[in-house]
Amino acid sequence: MQCPTCGAVLSPTAKFCSRCGTRVAAQQPAAPSPVPAAPPPQTQPATGAMSAYGNQMGQRLDLPDPQVIARGRGVTGMEYQIVGTTLQAVILELDPGETVYSESGAMSWMSGNIQMATNTRGGGLGGMFKRAISGESLFLNEFTSVGGKGIVAFASDFPGKIVPVSLLEGQTMIVQKQAFLCAEKTVGLDIHFRKRLGAGFFGGEGFIMQRLTGPGVAFVCLDGEIVEYTLDAGQVLKVDTGHVAMYEPTVEFDIEMVKGFKNILLGGEGLFLTTLRGPGRVWLQTMPTFNLAKAVAGYLPSRSGSGGDLGDFIGNLMND
């Protein structure tokens, strides 16, 4: 601090200048530093399922979008995305005039400008007969977008994967019975009869599978997780019944009996194994529907109990 008259240096507590006697105004105390505001109290997250979505009372409810697993486009211009992880759905976006088709009863939701038509898709009586003996629905549903872009969605009815199968002109793929979900109108769907009677009678999926023929994208539902193998010419893969989900037509499918009396009696693997002989690719599924139904059936009440109807349902599922 300095004297305003002579400029002498003064102590901070001086009341007058010791050199010239000029009175010095008392210094104002420095303003205290502002006290920081206390942080707002932490709000405890809501308990229950809704806490994962972060919604607040009285506010708009916004649920998170499901995870998109895959996106793509078909030969007709159809765009698709597969959403979900365990129970998946495929959502198709169609331009005006574009058409897809599915098994009867497979559609989950669609926009208002999608028109549905039920027919045999040119199979006639012969096609209906083959579908009848295979246990499939006699008719197929076609979905066409009219007057603008539209969406139609198909969901899986069993924990597993929806797999897009992109096929070139004339290219084919063999899939397990009832795996087909939907496809572009350019994809051919037919019944595939196994050439070997043994494979048909003991193969676990019956004598009949499904054959998809390109061009276009088809969507199939496979059970559980999917494991892919590429077999060289002559290379053999032995698979427990029902785990074969899909394979290329170059792969030879056959059935062989388990060797060894003790293996048959005590092994618990059944009498037969599926043999897949290369060349070609095969896709195996980790949780066949039949195996799950068989495991659950052991815990259900007997017919005389209260759960008879559910037991009948599981029994029918195992016999499909």
Image (cartoon, rainbow, N blue to C red):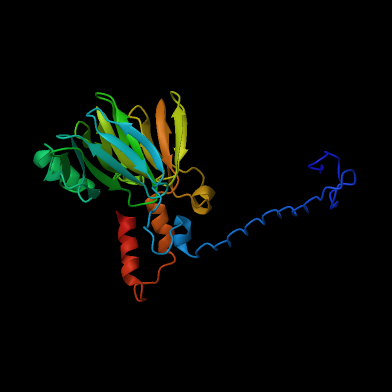
**Horizontal relation, residue 19 to residue 263: left or right:** right
Res 79 → quadrant: top left
Which residue shows up at 31% across the image and 43% down it? 90
Residue farthest to the right? 18
Q: Residue 82: x and y, percent?
A: 35, 41
Res 7 → quadrant: top right
Along the line of sight, the residue nearer the viewer: 113 or 250: 113
Residue farthest to the left? 125
Along the line of sight, the residue nearer the viewer: 239 or 154: 154
Which residue shows up at 52% across the image and 51% down it? 267
Along the line of sight, the residue nearer the viewer: 264 or 253: 253
Which residue shows up at 29% across the image and 53% down it? 320
Q: Residue 179: x and y, percent?
A: 31, 43
**Horizontal relation, residue 21 to residue 90: left or right:** right
Res 192 → quadrant: top left
Q: Is there any visible trace of residue 6 in the rendered image? A: yes
Along the line of sight, the residue nearer the viewer: 3 or 40: 3
**Horizontal relation, residue 251 to residue 211: left or right:** right
- State which quarter of the image contains the N terminus: top right
Q: Residue 227: x and y, percent?
A: 46, 38
Q: Is there any visible trace of residue 214 in the rendered image? A: no
Q: Residue 76: x and y, percent?
A: 22, 29
Number of marks: 0
